Amino acid sequence: MARTLLFFLFIFFAMGALSQTQQQRQKKLLGIIMGNVLESKTGKAVPFAAVSVQIIGDTVKTASSLTDKNGSFEFQQLPLGYFRLTVSAMGFATLNMDSIYLREERYDFNLGDVKLSEEANSLGEVIIYSEKPLIENKDGKLTYNVGESALSNGATTAELLKNMPLISNDPNGKILLKGKEPKILIDDKPTDLTAQQLQDLLESLPGNSIEKIEVMTNPPPQYATETGGVINIITKKGKIGWVGRSILSAGTRGEGSFSTNLSYRNKTFSFASTISLGASSFVGNSYSKRQNFYADSSNKFNTETNYDNKNLRPGLRLQGDYQINPQNLFNLTYQGNLSYFDNLSHTQYTNINRFDETYKISTRTNASQGDGYSHYISGSYTLKSKKSLAEYIRFIGSWSDGKNDNDKDYYQQFLSGSYVPTGMDSTQNQYFNTFNRGYSLRLDYNKPLKFLKGNFNTGTSYQFSRFHNTLNTSFLSKTDSTFVPNNLLSNDFFFNQGIFTIRAGFSFVFGQQLHLIFGAQAEETKTNFDFVKGNSANVSNSYWNLLPNITLRKEFSRTMNTALVYRASIRRPGLGELNPNIDYSDPYNLRFGNPFLAPTLADNFDWNFSLMKGKYYINTSVGYNIVKQVINSFRTLAGGGKTFITYVNIADRKEYEASAWGGYTFNKWFRMNGSLGYSYNVYAEAEKQLYKYQDGGSFYTTVQYTYNPNSLLTMEGTARFSSFADPQGRSRSNLTMNLGFMYRFFERRLVVGINIADPFRAQQYFSSVYGTNFNIESFSSSNTRNFRLTLSYQLNKLVQKKAITDKQKQDIINKVKSKKAPVPPVKKPIV
């Protein structure tokens, strides 16, 4: 594997050296500037506008061109230096954009949409261009510009999230923000999906379809009650006209993917589609060592497992936006996912007496096959006021439907301490079938106030979800070789959950940029279990909560601010924590949910400070949380050496936390960003004595770096580490790494990328659990080491050099006649 790594590094450094040699020959003709010219009022493309670029202070070195029929323009082979872009067209005010800095480490700029104002309303505009870094920080919002990232090539959205500052994963792969589970939005809309559906979506959504990812540790008013903050994933909306890109990737750990993105955009309508297919095969191993303590003896129980998990994930995403006028906007999105999996594991169980002698062994093979699908449709309508576009009312609705089947087979053979078969074995089958369906409705209203630069926002929402879960368990009868139903381990139930919320909030600005933001949300949650078959009684629950929030923020300058934040938050138990199904995958460690769980409520107090100055930025946060009815997994030792793992509302706890994230630009080629956080949990003395709860600290850190030796080669990497404490123990990972290289060919239409994950050591998790009468030490490792090659090809040129149509000719003639002015002259390119 080391030879493979060295080979890839050699190839890319060779390409970098070659590109630098070519630059030395043509050092003054490297620059590229491109973009789209649109009408500011309507969003319509402006064809055949005169566009020129000029080195500031040098009137000789100038290049001019016309936009194509889609309003696109591109200049190539420009010298290095500071440029001024000038755009002029009949009926529009001339626009000048200054300070476009072409230099050796970055000499290609896509300016995106350049909007022209009507001549009657504007005398001309001068814009100072500001570059978009890989990671931005503003008002406590951390933005990862995925379009600038080398790691997005061939990656999934789930993989991209792992590279974000403040983001970590627990041993089960769940995404955590500052150690807590966040709310996931896509294009500012809540996903409202089950945990499994959300995981399938993030795994199937290609990273190159993402424009940027926003992380909000102190979320906006409509999501202020979310315990773990908010992550907003913004998808790409495309450029004027048709744009297409295909991506093919393959990795050494047994993974591959193919996706195609097609988008279309005109003055009022935009459409984007992504079709994808991903496949992967993960192998890994684990072990656990448990020591049991009884009144008169003790023994040990060891487990060793290896597994091979395979899956296939087709996906389709369609998105359309329609703007009737600046006051009326529609959006409709469809996301469909399929999943197929085939998992196989082999486990050995070893019983050891107090004299460290093995007296019993058993082996167990678990095979699991299944498939599933999910459909998710969301739509929104926004009505803006004619007097002020900042005043709007927005309606968001969504509908989801899904199904998952899981057919599990277990075969267990019992051996003596010397591996001699005892003649006893057992075969069981568990068939899980889960249906889910839900919908959500949300209404938001925002209105600026004249008093103290104030703002008023309010809204209401309702979310309903329904699950139908069936589990049929059977065992193989040796007498007639038939499977006999086991009703004690089978059930059939419906679970319904409805959440109603209503909120209101205000914000005001006092004197020297002192911002006061406050509000409250009232919500009612209703849940019920209806058991058709099973050993549990029907359960229903209903609770109201009032959750206030207040923020006091001081803006010392445009680059420095501080804030005091209080917000009440709620964490409702999920179906995985409520589901009473008994998972029999491990007969010595039985898992099941608790339908009687209550929600976790918290009072969160935070102080934040942000500073951006020159080459660096830094954010710090210190917090104190009072958490009530904490939901946590809990393990107990029963007779026969078995443990039961379920979820309970443990005692209240106090949390002390601190975090920091920032970045530094060392020079014009190299930038670094990083984050770290620490939290300490404190439990009551009674629980420590009764259940052996332990106070403990959690730590997580991420380092991200980017190197751009030239505009054709991009290198990027991340390194992560985490260690999480819970009342019964701790889990931690080893240091994980991710390196990305991206090189552009054929006028940047072909992009070749190499991603190297965990080149030195595969991802590993270590955990320890301490109960009242047992201790467990566990280890797990999966083959995350991967060398991925990705090919990405732009299906069409970004600037279309096609002949003008008769209709476009007539439109230009009519516009010229209406203004009674000649067509502006256009210079030929001069470099």
Image (cartoon, rainbow, N blue to C red):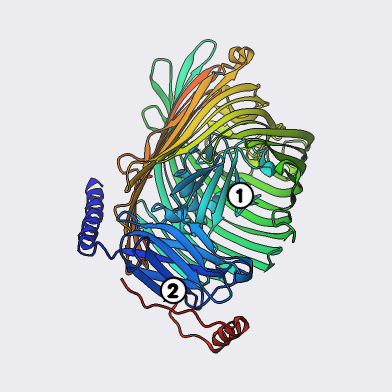
- Is 532 in front, or is 809? 809
Instruction: Give the class, few, some or many, for how many residues have Cα within 10 Å of label 1's Cα (few <14, many ≥20).
Output: some
- Residue 521 image position (x, y, % from top left): 75, 38
- Residue placed at 46% from the left, 53% from the top? 130
- Residue 681 image position (x, y, % from top left): 56, 22
Specify the quadrant that holds the C terminus. bottom left
- Element carrying mark 1: strand
Instruction: Give the class, few, some or many, for how many residues have Cα within 10 Å of label 2's Cα (few <14, many ≥20).
Output: some
Residue annotated with mark 1? 185
- Residue placed at 63% from the left, 70% from the top? 120
Residue 539: image quadrant is: top right
- Residue type at mark 2: give it: Val
- Residue 717 image position (x, y, % from top left): 36, 45
Q: Is residue 44 above or below residue 525?
A: below
Residue annotated with mark 2? 799
- Residue type at mark 1: give it: Leu
